[in-house]
């Protein structure tokens, strides 16, 4: 998180307490800040602000989309084999409660060869109500061709719910043109905002068939006696009540800083340049095997210890790197280590990472 965002969070909290957290003056300020955050996100995603629901994180957004469908016994949900445990668990609970069938299609194997769109099309059924998948796969970094997947789902009358944890802030996005029904994201990953703020884009044509999963005063329009009379006509329909508003300010500042550096296209171009640089360096390390056999399309660079390092584990490598001040993470399936590079990552930092990995492999 950039310092300007951290400072904005602290200043906002101070302002709220100084003005008085329950007064009319602060309420007006909160409304303005909430609107500013919604506009900042919408501008980054090229959508109207009213299509954005403010949430706490990706998983909340996914739950809103997945639970808001009126499920019937015999409906079908299609997942890929690269989804986050939170999405899998949500689908399993929907299946248990509503006698919905959940199946998985094999996308992981298409990282270097194969057609993920064809595989998804093959696994669709006439009663597939929803496909839930990630735009950028969190384990391998593969970028799925979402435009083509949207077409396949729409021709089958199937809603597409996208876990965008690794795509918002990384890819240049125009969700209006992309056409996914639901696109859930967070502000604390590639947008570098504070944890606790995320969002959900709901395509306007899908809004009327998606009922609120959670309900609160922000969800509804009230009459003169403060009685709810209808749902909000915008993304506020899926919001609930009091939020950590200072974090909204922090995310707004973080987005503004990114935009000062360059367009989303320029940022993505630099991210890919950096990931290719790191990938090439890792490919030259004895004892390391990158999952991709060509430069990554995202800022996620996943790699494994090869057969010459059978006595060492991914967790041991990640723990060693952390002791050297470099943060990576393990992935369970496939068993690998994942490094992330952003547009502001320095070549010297990537060189240092590779040097430490080489030293670990030689131990």
Image: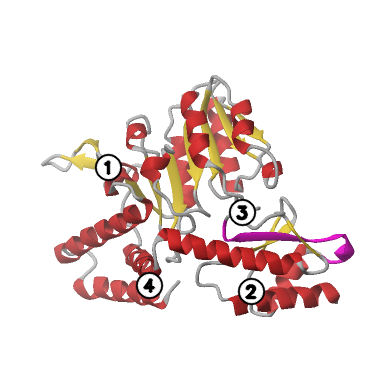
Residues 284 and 298: in front is: 284
Residue 31, position in %: x, y? 22, 58
Q: Give the residues in magenta.
A: 298-312
Please identify the quarter of the rendering in which residue 38 is found: bottom left
Instruction: Kindly report the distance in space between the C-alpha atoms of the residues bearing marks 4 and 1.
Output: 27 Å
According to the picture, the residue beneath numbered tag 2 turns out to be 350
User: Going 38% across and 41% down the picture, which residue do you hit?
Assistant: 177
Q: Determine if residue 340 is in view.
A: no
Residues 284 and 211: in front is: 284
Say what secondary structure mark 1 lies in: loop
According to the picture, the residue beneath numbered tag 3 turns out to be 141
Mark identifier at residue 5: 4
Q: Determine if residue 318 is in view.
A: yes
Quarter placement of the C terminus: bottom right
User: Going 73% across and 77% down the picture, which residue do you hit?
Assistant: 356
According to the picture, the residue beneath numbered tag 1 turns out to be 234
């Amino acid at each position: 998180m950039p310092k300007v965002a951290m400072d904005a969070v602290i200043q906002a909290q101070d302002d709220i307490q100084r003005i008085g957290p329950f007064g009319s003056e602060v309420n007006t300020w909160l409304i303005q800040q909430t609107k500013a955050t919604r506009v900042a996100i919408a501008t980054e995603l090229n959508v109207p602000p009213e299509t954005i629901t403010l949430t706490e994180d990706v998983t909340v957004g996914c739950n809103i989309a997945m639970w808001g469908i009126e499920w019937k016994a015999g409906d079908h949900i299609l997942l890929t084999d690269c989804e986050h445990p939170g999405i899998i668990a949500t689908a399993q609970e929907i299946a248990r409660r509503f006698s919905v069938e959940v199946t998985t299609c094999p996308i992981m194997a298409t990282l270097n060869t194969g057609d993920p769109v064809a595989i998804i099309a093959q696994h669709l059924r006439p009663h597939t109500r929803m496909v839930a998948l990630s735009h950028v796969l969190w384990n391998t970094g593969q970028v799925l061709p979402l435009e083509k997947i949207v077409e396949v789902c729409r021709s089958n009358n199937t809603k597409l719910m996208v876990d965008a944890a690794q795509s918002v802030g990384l890819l240049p996005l125009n969700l209006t043109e992309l056409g996914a029904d639901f696109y859930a994201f967070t502000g604390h990953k590639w947008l570098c905002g504070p944890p606790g703020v995320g969002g959900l884009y709901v395509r306007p044509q899908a809004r009327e068939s998606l009922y609120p999963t959670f309900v609160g005063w922000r969800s509804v329009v009230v009459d003169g006696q403060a009685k709810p009379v209808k749902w909000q006509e915008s993304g506020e329909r899926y919001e609930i009540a009091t939020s950590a508003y200072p974090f909204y300010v922090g995310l707004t500042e973080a987005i503004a800083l990114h935009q000062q550096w360059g367009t989303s296209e320029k940022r993505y171009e630099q991210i890919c340049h950096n990931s290719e640089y790191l990938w090439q360096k890792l490919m030259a390390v004895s004892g390391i095997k990158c999952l991709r056999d060509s430069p990554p399309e995202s800022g996620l660079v996943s790699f494994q210890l090869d057969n010459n390092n059978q006595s060492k584990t991914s967790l041991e490598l990640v723990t060693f790197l952390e002791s050297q001040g470099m943060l990576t993470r393990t992935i369970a399936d496939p068993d690998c280590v994942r490094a992330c590079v952003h547009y502001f990552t320095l070549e010297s930092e990537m060189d240092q990472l590779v040097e430490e990995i080489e030293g670990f492999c030689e131990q």
